[in-house]
Image (cartoon, coloured by chain):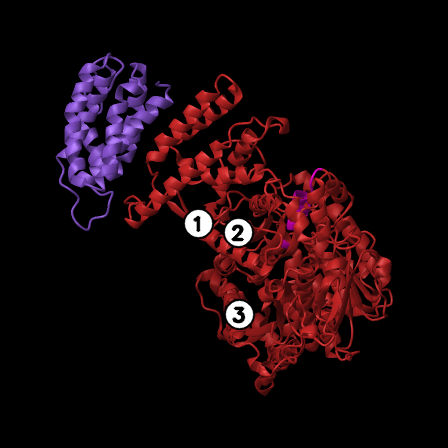
Amino acid sequence: MMQQPRDSTFQRPSNEDLRAIITNPNEAKKLVEWANRLGKSLKDMGLTTSQIRALFGEVRQIQAEWRINRQRAFRRLVLLRPKMAYRARRERGRAVEELVAVLDPALNHVIQADPRPEGQQPGTDDNQDDNFQRFAEFFEAILAYHKAYGGQ
Amino acid sequence: MEREDAYRIALAGLLHDIGKFAQRTGGWQGAHTEVGGEFVRQFVPEGWQADLYPVMGHHDEPLLTYEAKLIALADRLSAGERLAAEAAQPRQLLSIFCSLTADGQQAPEDKYWPLKPLRLEEAAVFPDESLAESQVTAAYSALWRGFEQETRHLLKAHARAESLSTYLESMLLLLQRYVWCVPSAYYRSVPDVSLYDHSRATAALAVCLMEQPETHIDELLRALKTWHQERAKALDAPPPPVLEETTVALLVGGDISGVQDFIYTITARGATSALRGRSFYLQLLTEAVARYVLRRLELPITNLLYQGGGHFYLLARPSDSSCLAEIRQEVSRILLRYHQGDLYLALAELSLVAADFYEGRISQKWGALVEHLRRAKQRRFAELGPGLADLFAPQGHGGNEERECQVCGREHPGTRTDDDVRKCPPCLSYEELGDRLRQARYLWLTEMKADDELGAESGGWEEVLRAFGLQAGVAEELTAVPNTGRPRWILALEDDAMDNLRPDAHTVVGRRLLVNVTPVYGKADEEWLGRLPKAQQGALRQELPQEPQGKIKPFALLEAQSTGIPRLGVLRMDVDNLGTLFAKGLGDQATFSRVAALSFAISLFFEGWVEVLAKRVGKTADGRDRLYSIYSGGDDLFFVGSWDAVVELARKIRADLTRFAADHPGVHASAGIALVGGKYPLYQAAGDAGRAEAQAKEVRRRVNGREHRKDGIAFLGQAIPWRQFGVEECREGMETVHSLAHWLERLTRDEQDGGAKAPKALLQMLIRLQEQYAEATKERALLGEDRNKAGEEQVYYGPWMWRGHYFLKRMARRYEKDDPEVAKAVDGLAEHLHGENFRAIEWIGLAARWAELLGRDRST
């Protein structure tokens, strides 16, 4: 179910949808659809890339580190939550706040999951490793659509 | 004389229903047997009229003569059912494809062959909606006028009734031209068998039935009658035992094996003309062997059901079996002697009992014969017994370099140097044949005694044919055709060449379908070369033979004349599931005539229409020919040429095959295209194209829950369904690989060449996106997650979607100010792909690579 929009232009995915996007490998369609919608709304709200460049950069770095030192990468991931909260408050306008309001619960689905069991293939159902990949993709997709709709 | 008797019966069989054709012009009154009798009186030389009583009498009750009974029985077996009532006349011939079930589907609507003489013209060859009632009679009358005129020529030529065999074959070819589109009758209320196919099948069967004594023919006719009465009460009434016990004919198949190696395993030196010559020689060899078998068995030409592309099928008498065993040995001995085991003829036979002609059983028999042939091929030369040892005896002296041919690698005492290359006499003879073919308008054949003039052994193709009692050649002008006084055939290779032909008492004339597309060096090529930069021009001129005018263009030139990147394209293509089409497609509707009709239709396309397409597609606006047919016949083809022309040809063939097959969704073909350099060994290119074709046959797609197999093309290493590749006329767009490739090519072309000068990086980006997708797909398939629970392939959502959208949008924006056209186009592409859920990701890279090759600067 979709939550009530805070204002007329912005719709957020429900927690159910977010869970699906992050934990279910077969819900990529939902991921793309929501990323598209969010990208467009955020552009309309005036989000600029520079406002969140640092956050996305951090996610990319964590992605790179994940394979090398999983423990440290996970620690950085947990610390991403306060960083996001800080950004949401600091930046002007409501756009970053809205974005973080989506990303934070999404990130929570990563942090709370158990690591992928030994012997299981990448890309499987609800586990920390794959959920994180999907989280990173989700973030990337939102930004790609934001840019595609003309976001600066 | 038994031989003469067979010809008489064959002629009676061939003409037994000619009255039906005459009747439909509206100008002849009476039952078709009476009209047929009148036709015989007016148009058949007097000397043979008495033999044609069965034309009038084959429906009499009771049947009056032995001959009439033979024709009546053959007529019924060929039609595979009780004789239809005379009351209603079918108007037009329903396309045989409309009776076909393939891929579990049928043609969407009934289509009819036009009522026109057989010519390779759009209006004659493609089936269409049926004509209005008022047009039908006029069409029949026009068709009949042509037939009548030709028949008069034939009558005049044979006024003295000297050579029945010549007359019979001329008549057969006449019927093929004029009666191929005339329906014979309603069989099971479907008029899909032509009078031509039904008549020749009846003729063939009647000859085979001559072995049965009259009392036995009576018995069979009675049994058929009884069975039909019983079936009227209970559909599944079993046939009376006599129909199951009487062998009425042998179905004989011949199949030359070793063809692939024979054609392709030659070096590139002198390959261009040798290749065509070798391929054509195989066709002549098939014909020579088929006619040899007929002659040895004293069977008329009407007993040859099909010949072409290394195969033939004929109908023989039950007692011919032992003679066939001898013939098998003779043929093998000759082939072994001249080809040292490279070529082999598998000859197999199968007995047919009377009941085999009913309830679709004939298709299974046909399938069984093909299986026999396959097994015979696995025991090549086994029939030679002790003579087989020759195969393993050392050949040549070994290591005599000056005697080793640089084209085929064999040693031959007559090897000599030609154009700086050492060639053996057989290879030289193939080259010469290939060269002569390029301007050929006629093919001529003459019969000779098999042992005539066998002496000096050069081993050239002409000698091999002579060993089978046939002399053959091609000519551009009729005056060049030798007249030896012996029976001969002159066959026009083009429709127009047909108009100059007149039969005489010893000359059979007719049309022979042969895909003969040869790129010849001409004025347009000279001018084209003259426009090239000096260095490139010089390099290409070195590849040309001395005095290139009128000679076959070397591969290097075809390669250089490609659009975009210079490459030679090699195309192999064939009809999907052909065996199943024949064995199961007609179901229990399969009759002897129907199987013949299907086989005729498929060869009409591949031996006839493909030539028209190739000539059209191969020619550039300034008159250069860029396509070269190595082989096209039966149901498959092999073409070489400038790569972009080869791709367009494949598309055109695929598109027209559907139209030709009455839009039947289950009749389709797969193609493989390999791009190679002009000096790449051809046998490897043939192998590459063959593997590409195999890859195309692996194509699967799902539409409305139904899986479709094959019907694909493999190009640039990727196999894709034709539907997605695009078979439509050339236009730009985003719907198919083809339309997108052309659109992208123009978009990225330079402005002075009429392009929009979009960055080439666009192509690179699309290619990379697809690569990303392909990699992810591979992984997903490993996990078995590429299908949903219903087993259907799913759209795969992934990073390429947002990344592609992002890249395209960004690129569009960058061009907004300086080049609004590019910006708009790229933006449109982004929107289109997005709207389609990026489904094009599976082929977008292929389109981009295609565009890239098309736009590749020639100098790099």
Give the extent of the magenta segment.
B606-621
What residue is disc 1 on? Answer: B699
**Is residue B59 in view from this perspective?**
no
The purple-tinted chain is A
Query: Residue B82 location, x and y as percent?
Result: 56, 61
**Quadrant including the C terminus of chain B:** top right
The residue that appears at 27% across and 30% down in the rendered structure is A138
Dominant secondary structure, magenta: helix
Q: Position of residue B109 (x, y in %)?
A: 53, 42
Q: Nearer the viewer, mark 3 or mark 2?
A: 2
Direction from residue B165 to residue B580 in the image, left or right: left
Q: Residues within 10 Å of mark 3 (few under 14, many from 20)?
A: many
Of all chains, the one bearing label 1 is: B
Q: Is residue B609 magenta?
A: yes
Distance between mark 3 and mark 2 Cα atoms: 29 Å
Mark 1 or 3 closer to N-term?
3
On whether disc 1 and disc 2 are found on a single subunit, the reply is yes
Residue identified by numbered label 2 = B672
